[in-house]
Image (cartoon, rainbow, N blue to C red):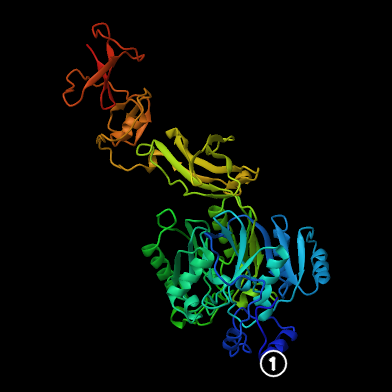
Amino acid sequence: MNKLFYFFCLTFFSLLSVYAQGTYLPKGLDVTENDKMEVYLSNLNPSSDVITTPPNFDIRTMAEWEEIQALTIAWEGFEPILTEIVRNAVNECRVLIACDNPSQVEDYLEYNNVPTNNVEYLNVNTNSIWMRDYGQNTIYKNDVDSIYLVDWVYNRPRPADDTYPEYLANYMNIDLYQTSQNPNTLVHTGGNFMSDGFGTAFSSNLVLDENDISEFQIDEIMNNFMGIDTYIKMETLPFDGIHHIDMHMKLIDEETLLVAEYPEGMSDGPQIEENLQYILDNFTTKYGTSFKVVRIPSPPSTSGYYPGEQPELNNSIDGYYRTYTNSVFVNKTVLVPFYREEYDTIAQRIYEEVLPGYNIVGIDCDNSGNNIISQSGAIHCITHSVGVNDPLLISYKKIEDTCPASNPIIYFESVIKHRSGINEAYFYYRPEGIDSFVAVDMQNQGNGLFSVYLDLDYNFENIEYYVHAVANNGKEQFRPMTSLDGGVYTFKYSLDECDGAECVPESDLDCFAFDIWDPVCGCDGVTYSNSQYAACNNIFNFTIGPCDSNVQLLDYDNSQKKLIIVTDMMGRQIKNLENHKVVILIFDDGSVKKLFRN
C-alpha cells in the first residue's frame, strides 16, 4: 500500500534516520527535509488500490460541522493533548488512532481513565502528528449518496504520513480517490482548506505556491475531485510561516466566518482584515448573502508578545501563533485550543454564542513540556474526520431579525436530503421563555427542498427554532445538531426591527394587515385597529388599546379617507348617532377615531 516508491537509497536512509531518533517532526519542513521535497514529488508511485482519475458523478465535499462516524489521530508525541482529545470524542463517534504499538497506547489511555470502548487502534506507521495535513477528505456522490475519500499529495517528504489515507480507506472499506498522477497531481494540505459543504472552499495562496501548474488547473482538479466550484484563495500572512488558514479563520456554518483578531496594526491583523474584506467584496454565501463575521481575540504570550517582530509597536519578540480558530467539530462537541484563562473564557463565550447547545471543550495547548502551539499547530492540525455513510443533510439560511409589518408572513425553506428519501420534515418554533415548541409540517417542493409559511404573533419578539427530519429508512437528524440539547437558533420578530424612528404617519398602500379589531394607540395619538395597521402607516411605537382622549372631534375632516363603520364603545355597529355620547369611527386606512357628542 505505498504511494511512494523509494528510488533513492540516500533519501530513504536519511529520512529513516530522522524518524528513528525519537524526535517529533514539526508541522513545517524539518531542516533535514528542505532539499528532499523535489526528489520526493518526482518519484510518486500510486498504489493500484487507489483511483487517480476524477469521479464520473456529481460530488459534494462534506463540511466540518456535518455528522461524522470517526475522528482520526496519530499517536506521535504530545500524548497528554491526544489523551484529552480521545476523552472528549469517544462519546460522539469512533476514535481511530494510528500507532505502532496499540497495547501501549491503550494502557496509556486506561491509566489516564479514558474510556476505550469506542477506540480503535490502527497498527500502522506514521511520521508525524499532523493528521489534518496528510489525512483523508470526505466526499459524497450526489450530495448524500455513497461515501468516498479523497487524498492529496502531502506537502512534506514523509512517506508513512502520505500513505496513511490508503491504509485508512482499506480499513474502513471506502474507495479512495487520489490526486497523485498527472494531469491531476495536486499538492495540498488539510490545514489550508475549509469548505461550506456546497461547493465553496477557502485556502491561502500556499496552494498556488506549492504546485507547478496554473491556478485554472488547480481549480479544475478541485472541482473534478471535490466538487469545489468557487475556490477562494487569499494572500498568505507575513508572520505565519505555515500559511494555513486554520490558524486564523474557521467556517462555523454556511454563513459564518470565525476570524482571529489582533490589536490594531499588530502582527497579521492587517493582512487578515485585507483578506476578509476581499472575501466580503467579491464572494457571497450559497444563499447569495454576505458572510457574517465573528471575531475572536488571539492571545499574546505571557510576556504580551504576538507573532512577528514589530519593535515600533512594542512587539520586539516573535510570539507563538496562539489561535482559537484551530478547533475541530466532533458532532455535538467542539474541541478548542486553550492557552490562558483570561483569554480562554472570552473564547469559550464566543463559541457558545455562535454554536448554541454545543459542548465546547478547551484543551491546553500551551502547557510547559506539552507546548504544541510552539510547533505552529493545535487541535485542528492533529485531527481529521470521516463522515457518516448515510448523511441526512439539512441546510438552511438562518432567519434574519424581522419587522412584523413588512413581513407578517415569514417564508422559510431548507435543503433536506437523504439517499432513501425524506419521510417527514418539521419546523419547530417557540417564543423565547416558553417550554414547548410548535411543530409545523414542512412541504416538499421537490429536488430536496422543503418549505413552510409562518404566521407569527408580533408579541413573540424572540423566536427560537430548529428543523427536524426523518428519512424513509428511519434515520433522524436535527439542525442545529444540538437542538434537543437546547441548541436552537433565534431571531427577533419585533417592531423594534422596523424602520421609522420618528413618529410620522405615512401610509404604505402595498402593506398587508389582517382585518381584525385589536386596537393600539399610536405615538401620533391615533387609534389603529391593530398593530399591523399601525405599522402599515409607519407607526411602530404604540401602546396596547385605543387612545384615551377627551378632545372634541366634531369638526374632524374625513375628506381624505373613507368612513367604513361606526360602533359604540362595545364594538357594536350603530346606525343612529342621536342616542350615543361616544362613538368609534373606523376608516378605510385602518385608523380609528373616538368621537364625543354634546
Please state which of residues 293 and 117 is positioned toward the viewer in this rendering: 117
- The residue where tag 1 is placed is 9
Tell me where residue 53 appears, x and y as whole percent. 56, 70
Work out whether residue 237 can be spotted: no
Q: Secondary structure at mark 1?
A: helix
Q: Residue furthest bottom?
A: 10
User: Residue 288 falls in which quadrant of the image?
Assistant: bottom left
Numbered disc total? 1
Q: Residue at x 58, y 48 (%)?
A: 418
Tell me where residue 153 appears, x and y as whole percent. 59, 76
Q: Residues within 10 Å of mark 1 (few under 14, many from 20)?
A: few
| Up-down relation of residue 569 to residue 272 (above or below) | above
Please state which of residues 147 and 18 is positioned toward the viewer in this rendering: 147
| Up-down relation of residue 452 to residue 18 (above or below) | above
Classify the position of the C terminus by image quarter.
top left
Q: Residue at x 44, y 56 (%)?
A: 286
Please state which of residues 576 and 383 is positioned toward the viewer in this rendering: 383
- The answer to whether residue 267 is left or right of residue 73 is left
Tell me where residue 257 appears, x and y as whole percent. 48, 61
Q: Residue at x 39, y 66 (%)?
A: 277
Question: Label 1 is placed on what type of residue?
Answer: Cys
Classify the position of the N terminus by image quarter.
bottom right
Work out whether residue 161 can be spotted: yes
- The answer to whether residue 243 is left or right of residue 9 is left
